[in-house]
């Protein structure tokens, strides 16, 4: 499951999902690798600030995902949740910066929350500012690399 970091309590949510797997069954979880999609968030924050006149948002508060976004910590954490034979692999994923893909990185992720208070005209303006900011910065691809952790329920 991609997005366990969306659970209000990531540990409880993961344990709940693992508990739904039959003993001996295999399950997997994915999260983004450290540093992946960060540039998209920075460009989005700047675009929202430019459109709304607000100051760019501060960095998000520390979250458990910041401790788990590397292979070894994720492997250990999944083992502590009741999985054995845990493997974690990085699936290198660099997306060419086509406008539709770049905007989907916003609307199809937790970044969409940055648009929640905006009206339609502001969303369009943010989209335009966000996409043009990549050109101005010379960014041609987005790192969307996930870590894929798979294990067997005890």
Image (cartoon, rainbow, N blue to C red):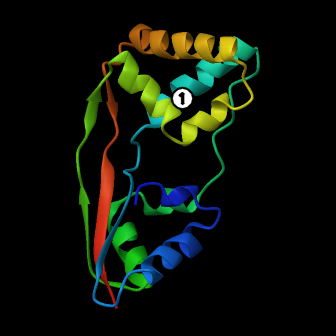
The answer to whether residue 118 is above or below residue 81 is: above
- Asked which secondary structure carries label 1, the reply is helix
In the image, what residue occupies the spot 55% across and 42% down?
Answer: 110
Q: Quadrant of the C terminus?
A: bottom left
Residue nearer the viewer, 13 or 85: 13
* Picture coordinates of residue 65, whole percent (x, y): 50, 58
Question: Is residue 73 shown above or below 32?
Answer: below
Q: Nearer the viewer, residue 135 or 26?
A: 26
Residue occupying image coordinates x 74% and y 16%: 52
Report which quarter residue 116 is drawn in: top right
Residue found at x 52% / y 77%? 16
In the picture provided, is 137 more to the left or to the right than 149? right
The spot of residue 38 in percent (x, y) is 46, 37
Q: Position of residue 62 (x, y in %)?
A: 62, 54
Q: Is residue 35 above or below residue 46?
A: below
Looking at the image, which is closer to me, 63 or 123?
123
Instruction: Give the x, y percent position of residue 28.
Output: 32, 68
Q: Residues within 10 Å of mark 1 (few under 14, many from 20)?
A: some
Q: Is residue 91 left or right of residue 137?
A: left
Which residue is tagged 1? 42
Give the camera-side residue of 81 and 121: 121
Q: Is residue 22 above or below residue 65?
A: below
- Quadrant where the N terminus sits is bottom left
């Amino acid at each position: 499951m991609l997005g366990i970091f969306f659970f209000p309590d990531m540990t409880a949510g993961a344990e709940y999902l693992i508990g739904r797997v039959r003993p001996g069954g295999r399950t997997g979880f994915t999260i983004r690798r450290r540093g992946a999609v960060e540039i998209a968030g920075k460009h989005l924050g700047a675009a929202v600030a430019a459109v709304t006149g607000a100051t760019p948002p501060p960095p998000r508060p520390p979250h458990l995902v910041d401790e788990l976004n590397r292979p070894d910590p994720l492997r250990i954490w999944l083992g502590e949740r009741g999985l054995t034979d845990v493997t974690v692999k990085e699936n290198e994923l660099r997306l060419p910066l086509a406008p539709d893909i770049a905007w989907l990185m916003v609307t199809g992720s937790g970044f969409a929350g940055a648009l929640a208070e905006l009206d339609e005209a502001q969303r369009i303006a943010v989209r335009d500012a966000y996409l043009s900011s990549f050109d101005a910065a010379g960014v041609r691809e987005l790192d969307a690399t996930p870590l894929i952790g798979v294990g067997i329920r005890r």
